[in-house]
Amino acid sequence: PTTPGKGRQGLIVRRDLATGAGFALEIQDGGVAFVAGDASGGEIAVCSGRAMQKRHWYLVAAAFDQARGAVTLVQRPLTRHPHTDDEAIVTETVAIAPEACAAPLIMAGARMADGTVARHYNGKLDSPTLIGRALELTELDAVLLRPMPQPIRRDLIGAWDFSREMPTTR
C-alpha cells in the first residue's frame, strides 16, 4: 500500500452496508482486517494488529472456515526488512458467519449505504483471487502460481491478472 495509515481502505469488498451482510478485506489502522456481517446486524472484525510499511508489497489473505467458525487473516511482507515487525497470522473463532448478499464485488474501494464508492485504496492490487473454501496456510503461495494448481483451481471463484493488457507510460 502507498499510504496504509490513511484510514479504512477497501481491498476486496462485497458488503451490503444497509443490511450488514457480506465481507470486506480492507486496511484498518494501518494493517489488514477482515470484517463480515450477517443480515441481522451482527458483525465481526479480525485485525492483523501490525502496521504495514508504506510503499511495500504484501500478500494479504482472509479465510473463513465455516466448519470451525474461524477466520484466519494473513499479512505477509513480500520483502522482509530487519527490525520491522509487520507480519501477522491471526486465527480467531467468531460468533457469526459472513452472510451472502446481492451487493456487487468492489476492488480498491467499498460501496457505501447510499450507493457511492468510498474508502478508496491507495496502492496497487496484484492478482486478487477468490477461492470457494478456506485454504490451508501451506496453500497460499500456490495461489500465485500460473497455472494455478488443480486442487485450488477446482474451488476458484475468480482470479484477476491486472498485469495483462494494461498499457503503461513508463
Image (cartoon, rainbow, N blue to C red):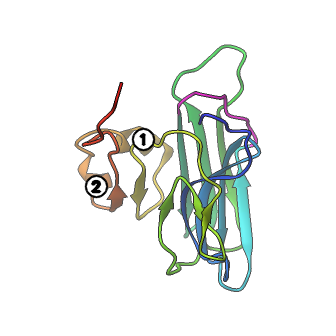
Question: From the viewer's perspective, is 84 left or right of 170?
Answer: right
Locate the C terminus by quadrant. Answer: top left
Locate the N terminus by quadrant. Answer: top right
Which residue is under mark 1? Answer: 126
Residue 6 location in percent, x, y? 73, 42
Characterize the magenta stretch by its predominant secondary structure. Answer: loop
- In the picture as drawn, the residue positioned furthest to the top comes out as 82
| The magenta segment | 49-57
Mark 2 lies on a secondary structure that is: helix
* Marking on residue 153: 2
Give the mark, 1 or 2, whose residue is nearer the N terminus. 1
Vertical arrangement, residue 63 with respect to residue 143, above or below: below
In the image, 48 versus 151, the foreground residue is: 48
Mark 1 lies on a secondary structure that is: loop
Residue 83 location in percent, x, y? 72, 15
| Residue at figure coordinates x 60%, y 39% from the top left | 75
Q: Is residue 29 magenta?
A: no
Spatial CA span between label 1 and label 2: 18 Å
| Residue at figure coordinates x 73%, y 37% from the top left | 50
* Amino acid under disc 2: Arg
- In the picture as drawn, the residue positioned furthest to the bottom comes out as 40
Residue 87 location in percent, x, y? 65, 32
Question: From the viewer's perspective, is 145 left or right of 106?
Answer: left
Nearer to us: label 1 or label 2: 1
Residue 92 location in percent, x, y? 70, 56
| Residue at figure coordinates x 68%, y 74% from the top left | 96
Vertical arrangement, residue 120 with respect to residue 36, above or below: above
| Residue at figure coordinates x 58%, y 78% from the top left | 99
In the image, 77 versus 56, the foreground residue is: 56
Q: Is the residue marked by circle 2 packed among few (<14), some (14-19), or many (20+) residues within 10 Å?
A: some
* Amino acid under disc 1: Asp
